[in-house]
């Protein structure tokens, strides 16, 4: 069974699109998870934004 050039190209593009969609899904889910964790950690802490900025600038 011979594949034409167009069929080969379509298979390659389909695989690429599927893989890209999978990576977008993974990065999106991990981003949402990080936001949730970060929000949960920050909300109960009494530190103000100024304290956070001071801490971050002193760490560098």
Image (spheres, helix red, strand yellow):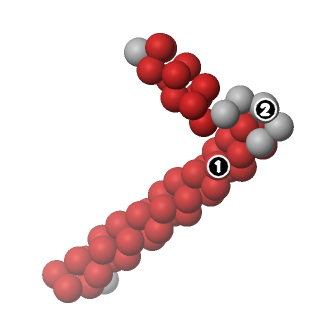
* Percent position of residue 48, x then y: 67, 34
Residue, disc 2: 45
* Percent position of residue 12, x then y: 30, 71
Left or right relative to 34: residue 2: left
Sequence-wise first label, 2 or 1: 1
Height in image: 54 above or below 20?
above
Quadrant into which the C terminus falls: top left
Left or right relative to 8: residue 43: right
Disc marking residue 35 = 1
Neighbour tally class for label 2: few under 14, some 14-19, many 20 plus, Cα within 10 Å: few
Secondary structure state at the residue bearing disc 2: loop
The residue positioned 52% from the left and 54% from the top of the image is 27
Q: CA distance from mark 2 to mark 1?
A: 16 Å
Foreground mark, 2 or 1, reads: 2
The answer to which of 10 and 60 lies nearer the viewer is: 60
Neighbour tally class for label 1: few under 14, some 14-19, many 20 plus, Cα within 10 Å: few
Disc marking residue 22 = none
* Percent position of residue 13, x then y: 30, 74
Residue 26 visible in this rendered orientation of the protein? no
Q: Quadrant of residue 34?
A: top right
């Amino acid at each position: 069974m011979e594949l034409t050039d167009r069929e080969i190209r379509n298979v390659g593009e389909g695989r690429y699109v599927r893989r890209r969609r999978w990576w977008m899904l993974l990065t999106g889910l991990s981003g949402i998870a990080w936001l949730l964790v970060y929000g949960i950690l920050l909300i109960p802490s009494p530190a103000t934004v100024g304290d956070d900025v001071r801490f971050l600038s002193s760490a560098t």
